[in-house]
Image (tube, grey):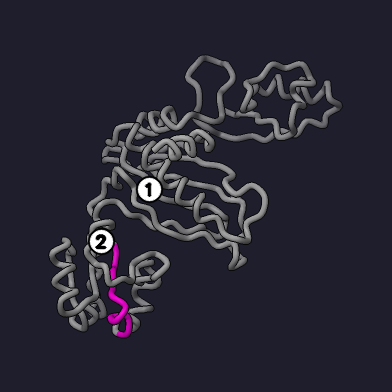
Amino acid sequence: MDLYEHQGKDLFARAGIALPQRTVATTPLEAADAAERLGGHVAVKVQVQMGGRGKGGGVALVHSPEEAATLAKETATVKFDATVEAHLRLGVDPRHADQMVRGTVVLPHGTGKVVRVAVFAQGDKAQEALRAGADEVGGEDLVKKIEAGWLEFDVALATPDSMGMVGKLGKILGRRGLMPNPKAGTITFDLERAVGEVKGGRVEFKVDKAAIIHVPVGKSSFEADAIVGNLAALVDAVNRARPSGAKGQYLKGLTIASTMGPGIRVDLPQVLAVAAAA
């Protein structure tokens, strides 16, 4: 369905069209009528969104976190347990170093995915990683195994004193986003904590060239409350990671979607309120 969202404040109100308080959604006929009454200067944009279920009426563009999570579950039509992903649009320019946004967050309800962890460590630290539940632990032997083509892991951790040997794998791990990095918390001596967090739902977020962060926040099999809890934790972490160079509105928009499902816009202030109450 085509939705027409007014971009200029109060223009539709002055045209005498009653609209929802927070968002504007009209039929094409109403938009054309308003434009005619205002001399053709009404700014509208066309979007395709999932929304209300009534027949032929206006459709709300922004949903409460609970409703958005429920819609994401209902619109997951694939035959497997679909991933629910959050897409958070930021008011930054990633081309500038002082506007880069990157960090990690532990999702309170996990990701729903079994995470395979490889750890580069030796001696007592190797034993600590094994006790913590790491799937593969090693030093030079693990480096040679990866050089030979083995890549059956999702996250790589390393102790600082192991980075000399791990550096040889820069071309292999770097292009796959698997290279240990201190900003992502994947280079550490506290392997027990790091392995536990990664296995328990820690995810990394990083703004892309389009100033958007993409992060999985659960599965379609999750309860809606669990998706909302994970979403709130993510938005709160990104909000706290606001860079010094960011000017104006920082959090600009949030959409969630299940695998191959439609985008569902979420009310950001309500998500932040959930995070504050947690």
Residue neighbourhood size for the residue with mark 2, other residues' Cα within 10 Å, grouped as few (<14), some (14–19), many (≥20): few
Q: Which residue is mark 2?
A: 193
Quarter where residue 127 is shown = bottom left
Q: Along the horizontal axis of the image, is 180 left or right of 276? A: left
Determine whether the residue tagged by mark 1 lies in a helix, strand or loop: strand
| Looking at the image, residue 185 lies above or below residue 13 | below
> What residue does disc 1 label?
216
Residue 123 lies, with reference to residue 221, above or below; the image says: below
Q: CA distance from mark 2 to mark 1?
A: 22 Å
Q: Amino acid at mark 1?
A: Pro
Q: Work out whether residue 80 or residue 268 is closer to the camera in this orientation and state it.
A: 268
Is residue 161 inside the magenta stretch?
Answer: yes
Look at 38% across and 40% down and name the residue there.
258
Residue ranking furthest to the front? 277
Amino acid under disc 2: Arg
Residue pushed farthest right? 39
Q: Please tell me whether mark 2 sits on a helix, a strand or a loop.
A: helix
Q: Which corner quadrant holds the C terminus?
A: top left
Q: Position of residue 86 (x, y in %)?
A: 44, 44
Residue 115 among magenta residues:
no
> What segment is highlighted magenta in the picture?
155-164
Quarter of the rendering occupied by the N terminus? top right
Q: Is residue 70 above or below residue 126?
A: above
Q: Nearer the viewer, mark 2 or mark 1?
A: 2
Q: Residues within 10 Å of mark 1 (few under 14, many from 20)?
A: many
